[in-house]
Amino acid sequence: MSDFLEQISSQEYHESVFDALREQDGQIYDLIIREYERLQNTLQLIAAENQCSRAVLAALGSIVQNKTTEGFPGARYHGGCEFVDDIEILAAARAKETFGAQYANVQPHSGTAANQIVLTALLEAGDKILSLGLDQGGHVSHGDRVSFGGKFFEVQNYYVNRDTFVLDYNAIRDQAIEFKPKLIICGASAYSRVIDFKEFRRIANQVGAYLLADISHIAGLVIAGAHPSSIDEAHFTTTSTYKPGGPRGGLILMGRDYDSTISVSGKQIPLWKHIQRTTFPGVQGTPYLNNVAAKAVFFKETLSEEYRARQFKIVENAQSLSDCLVKLGYDVLTSGTDNHMMLVNVANFREGLTGVIAQKCLEDCGIVVNMNRLPYDTKSMAVASGLRLGTPIVTKNGMGAEQMQTISELIDEALNGVKIETNSQYSIDESLRSEIRNRVKQLCGRFPMR
Ligand SMILES: *Cc1c(COP(=O)(O)O)cnc(C)c1O
């Protein structure tokens, strides 16, 4: 009887969490509700965003957040870890299963932290990294000079081809042979074509470098087989966990190289163990175990048929949106996409139009996107020539080819209607703005947040 009563009260505890927020802090509660309404009434087309499930939200908002410990399951520095150990063990096992990996580390607080851990594990100050430049679609955590990597390591960038905007593996190989990096990083934040991880590994082997594949943007596609996997090609695969639709956070995976050895202070230890020690105490402190629990919930979802089928649908939707935009006269880089995103050169669409004007006027109309510098862009970071669009959220909410056509038309009306004043200033007719905004709202109303 007393067990039964306790069970009821723990359930009530969890159900009362949001009531507590409403009662205790109406200001934050109201802002969260307004954010919900923003998401529900506008189109989310940011390629780096996704929408996690309610079950993931529940794990994030759970009392697991209160547990403090250091270390890994079975080797913790604090007592009381029996349940959080099981949570982390499940999370890692599910990550391995869904990615087909030999090793999974679910503790990185973010995709950036996952990269920082791998870089710290492999490199000494001054060692060489070869990575895709930030202005070419790479990520700041791949050694850009404003990041920790650029501060401590010697970084050289490789480029996409100037005419095709596609990676040129022969040029990358020549550069690697010349530069002799200790680490090659592949993976991108703004690149819409398949990345050939096998070819990158051949290049890495040829110059004796480690290969890190950062699949943050395409992790969901990799899970489903909608993009080739990096797991057994790269020595290390890192990803953010929110981009494929889980909680915010990072993940480090290893495939067939997981137990090859590395020399650390004169001793040979397995790579995975070295990654583990670099995670804690090397780079991070206590893991966020609520976040680890939420990752576990998410990895279970990724094993479902619904999740896997959705990843293919995301690509299909990106391809239809891209096709529609091309038909309307837009310059989509590489004329299409193999993944969930596309890059659009808006400066080539209309005299004077820039990325920043396009982003802002679309936002006025309820269409949320981000401006993006394009490879070899002549405009500054704050102005940019391009937009990056992605389809994970609209697909999650059930939209298909017909809605992609509608979205392309809405975008087109806004970008044709905007009055350009300078390269960052514009105005838009109030009647046009509210007309597009209402149509966006109606469209979103038919596909509520799932
Ligand atoms: C988004 C992204 C990251 C960063 O992930 P955070 O969790 O936001 O730190 C790292 N690498 C690539 C390629 C990304 O696109």
Image (spheres, helix red, strand yellow):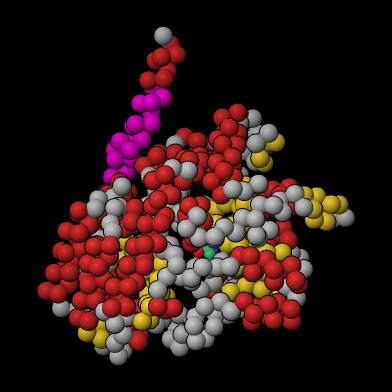
Residue 210, picture quadrant: bottom right
Residue at 32% over, 67% down: 320
As drawn, is 98 to the left or to the right of 387?
right
* On screen, residue 307 above or below 236: above
State the residue in front, 51 or 125: 51
User: Residue 176's x, y, as percent?
Assistant: 70, 77
Q: In the current view of this chain or complex, which residue is farthest to the left?
A: 431
| Residue 286 within the segment the image draws in magenta | no
* On screen, residue 3 above or below 276: above
Q: In the current view of this chain or complex, which residue is farthest to the top?
A: 1
Task: From the image, give the main secondary structure of the stretch colored magenta.
Answer: helix
State the residue in front, 150 or 332: 332
Residue at 66% over, 46% down: 102
* On screen, residue 293 above or below 39: above
User: Residue 28's x, y, as percent?
Assistant: 32, 49
Q: Is residue 111 visible?
A: no
* Residues in magenta, as a range: 9-26
User: Residue 222's x, y, as percent?
Assistant: 51, 56
| Residue 13 within the segment the image draws in magenta | yes
Residue at 51% over, 41% down: 296
User: Residue 309's x, y, as percent?
Assistant: 40, 50
Q: Is residue 138 visible?
A: yes
Residue at 52% over, 86% down: 162
